[in-house]
Image: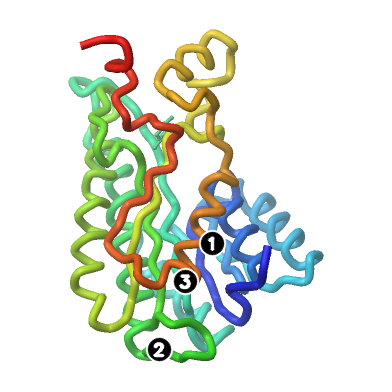
Amino acid sequence: MGKQLQGQVALVTGSSTGIGAAVARALAEAGAAVIINYHSDKSKGDAEEILEEIKSAGGDGFVHQCDISKEEEVLNMFSAILSRYGTLDIAVTNAGIQQDAPFLEMTLEQWNAVIGTNLTGQFLCAREAAKEFKRRGVDGSRSKAAGKIICMSSVHEVIPWAGHVNYAASKGGVKLLMQSMAQELAPYKIRVNSLAPGAIKTRINKDAWDTPEDEKKLLELIPYGRIGAPEDIAKAAVWLASDESDYVTGTTLFIDGGMTLYPGFADNG
Ligand code: BGC
């Protein structure tokens, strides 16, 4: 891979494991310094390991603990980034959680926790990133854009999901959050896009693939016939962060092996 992000600084929220970790590695490989954000103490070790890997490959970055649903903590994280690097070029607002329950049993705590991290958290991080991008403006030695925001959405920004209404509502919200930000920020040369993964093999959906029967059932939803890998998402994140996608804003890129193609209709209907 070329060094198309050389000299740029990237924040990846929720990057101690899963899709976030793969995105952090890939951005670092493309030359960006990467801030690895993690939420709870139990993820600290994983976050530090990713940073070690990045550093031993000649990259740079730091780890920062922060609950992105808390405004104060987000502001502190941005202060830490700006005091270390002076600016920011790329914000991947990736951190997300699931707290599943049948609708009739879903508690307000479960609703608020998922909306807080998946939607409010992306709003807070994107807002702080956009303030810095606008302040600095375009610096042609870094990128053609003043900044790039990449939201982590999901196929569930369009696919309804029984038993997961908090999650589906949060990702449906991300769709219009992203598009409205893109519309408002384009005049400042800030690009805003979403990645919408389908079933990617990570901890968040282990129950859906960890036995051969579960995996077979999940594959029925994926016309392309394989479960995704975090790297499938990471490669697209590098492209969306780079000048190769300079004319792309306000778009959701589905990376789902065809999950959004209504596979049930392939031999039916
Ligand atoms: C969810 C996963 C799920 C996938 C496809 C993702 O956004 O986090 O749990 O497997 O969508 O349904």
Identify residue type, mark 1.
Val
**Sequence-first tag of 1 and 3:** 3
**Camera-side mark, 1 or 3:** 1
Quarter placement of the N terminus: bottom right
268 w.r.t. 80: above or below: above
Q: Is the residue marked 2 within 8 Å of ligand 1, measured from its CB? A: no
Report if residue 117 is visible in the image: no
Identify residue type, mark 2.
Val
**Sequence-first tag of 2 and 3:** 3
- Taking the image in four quarters, ligand 1 sits in the one at top left
152 w.r.t. 146: above or below: above
Q: Residue at x 26, y 36 (%)?
A: 168
Instruction: Give whichever of 134, 36 is nearer the camera.
Output: 134
Q: Residue at x 49, y 85 (%)?
A: 87
Judging by the rendered image, the residue that carries numbered circle 1 is 238
Judging by the rendered image, the residue that carries numbered circle 3 is 90
Judging by the rendered image, the residue that carries numbered circle 2 is 138
Disc 1 from disc 2: Cα separation? 19 Å
